[in-house]
Structures are given as C-alpha cells and as structure tokens.
Image: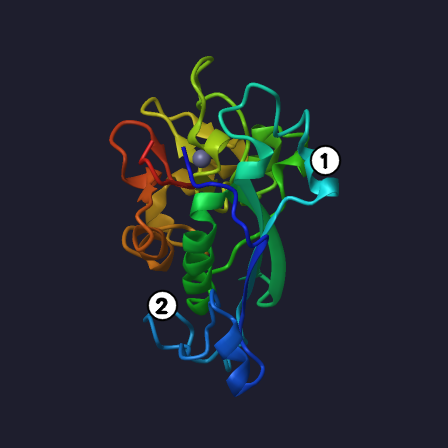
C-alpha cells in the first residue's frame, strides 16, 4: 500500500518571501492569493492574512525514537518509513499563529498540506497540534487535551480488534473536546466534550456540515465522521470514510 519511499526527503511549503522564490519551490503551498474573504468563513476584521508555512519530512531519528513503542509498535500496518512529519501553521483560540506537528502517511502528506492551508486561510482555530506520543500514545488523554492528531497505531475506537484508520496515518482528529465522538447511546468521548455533543451550539472550533474544515478535507477526498449514521465522530476525518 502507499507509494514508494520518496526520493526527495522533504516537501516544503512556504509562502515565498520574494516573487522569484516561488519558482524553485515545486511543491509550494502558499496563501498568497487568499485574502480574508476569499473563502467566505474568515473574519474580515482580523487584519491581513500572514503567509502559511507547512512542510512534510521523513521522520528524523529523534521522532522515530519517541514514537517507537508508543504510537508505533512492531506489527503495525505501516512502517515508519511510510510516515511523514508535517509541520503546520495553524491559528489558535488566542488569535495567534502556532506551529503544530502531525504524523501522517506519506501518500497523504501533500494533500494534507493543502487542506491545512485552506483551514489556515479560513482562520479556523485549532487548540493544539502535538504528536500523540506527548500523551503516551493514549488517545483518551490526547482527546481530553483537545489535541489534534493523526497517526496512532491503535485498535478501532470502541473495539478490541482491527486497526483504526489512524494506524495508517490516513485519519485525523480535530479539536476533540469541541468535536467529540458520540455513540448512538449518547456516550461522549472525551467526557469533557459533553456540552459539545449539542451541535447546535455552533461555537468556534466546532466542525459543522460544509464548513471550511469539512470543505478542506472533502477537497482532498477525505470524509467526515460527523456525517456518519449511528455513532458520530465529529472530530474525525479519514481517507477511507471509516
Ligand atoms: Zn479519529
């Protein structure tokens, strides 16, 4: 599955500081043409949009070491060589730009850079974006911290067998407290997200049908767990729709 290990170790996507700098950035993703009103969701009073920076790189030795035995174990369906470390600008709830990190499958690195650029242009706030290893690979702890994360080699939520799509780095959870997983019986994960099970709240950071986040992921062929029937996973997007 997936593509062969890329010969070029890193895809760097930064807004070029100079006009001619864009010419040698073959995989550049920039926000240069997108003003605050470009996609309809941004706050027109928020000032000029700063450039978006995003990059994807092979996993360095320190990251491999911190993942091994935590989010990554032997027997996982993809190897560390098939994963990429994405470094992404994102807005926080403090109105500032922060630099977050996720690990995702190499074949989704470039599409995810495009999706997170669109999310940045929309000024959509993301609480935090750290590797799940910062939480010992524990999804409950990561969710409780409202942490946005992708790769984690673990079983499907609520099941003891079968790999979650997160195990392939082809799924991501966004702002899990504000976008909890809600079973058909009404159980909410994380528990601190209980008030956000009421989707009519429509507070910042809550993903809503056809909003900027949903459109960003739909544009790269990913599907939203908030549109599932039965249990709904409002934080979850995946390539497979599972
Ligand atoms: Zn998920």
Distance in Å between CA atoms under marks 1 and 2: 37 Å
x and y percentages locating residue 158 in the rendered image: 44, 19
> Label 2 neighbourhood size at 10 Å, few (<14), some (14-19), many (20+)?
some
x and y percentages locating residue 230 in the rendered image: 27, 27
**Measured along the vertical axis of the image, is residue 175 above or below residue 38?**
above
Residue drawn at the location 48% of the way across and 50% of the way down: 109
In the foreground, 220 or 75: 75
- Picture quarter with the C terminus: top left
x and y percentages locating residue 212 in the rendered image: 35, 60
Q: Quadrant of residue 226?
A: top left
Whether residue 86 sits left or right of residue 185 in the image: it is right
Res. 234 visible in picture: yes
Labelled disc at residue 66 = 1
**Measured along the vertical axis of the image, is residue 148 above or below residue 25?**
above
**Measured along the vertical axis of the image, is residue 156 above or below residue 84?**
above
Res. 128 visible in picture: no
User: Residue under circle 2?
Assistant: 41
Q: Secondary structure at mark 2?
A: loop
């Amino acid at each position: 599955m997936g593509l062969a290990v890329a010969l070029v170790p890193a895809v760097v996507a930064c807004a070029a500081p100079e006009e001619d700098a864009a010419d040698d950035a073959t995989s550049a993703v920039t926000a240069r043409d997108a003003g605050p009103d470009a996609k309809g969701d941004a706050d027109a009073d928020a000032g000029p949009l700063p450039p978006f920076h995003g990059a994807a790189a092979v996993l360095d030795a320190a990251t491999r070491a911190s993942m091994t035995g935590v989010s990554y174990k032997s027997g996982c369906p993809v190897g560390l060589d098939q994963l990429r470390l994405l470094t992404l600008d994102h807005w926080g709830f403090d109105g500032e730009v922060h630099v977050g990190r996720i690990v995702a499958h190499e074949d989704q690195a470039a599409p995810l850079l495009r999706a997170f650029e669109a999310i940045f242009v929309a000024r959509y706030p993301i609480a935090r974006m750290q590797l799940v290893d910062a939480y010992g690979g524990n999804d409950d702890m990561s969710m409780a911290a409202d942490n946005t994360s992708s790769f984690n080699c673990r079983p499907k939520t609520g099941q003891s067998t079968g790999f979650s799509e997160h195990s392939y780095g082809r799924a991501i959870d966004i702002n899990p407290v504000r976008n909890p997983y809600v079973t058909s019986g009404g159980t909410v994960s994380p528990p601190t997200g209980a008030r956000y099970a009421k989707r009519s709240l429509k507070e910042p950071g809550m993903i809503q049908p056809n909003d900027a986040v949903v459109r960003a992921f739909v544009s790269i062929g990913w599907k939203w767990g908030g549109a599932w029937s039965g249990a709904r996973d409002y934080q979850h997007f995946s390539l497979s729709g599972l």
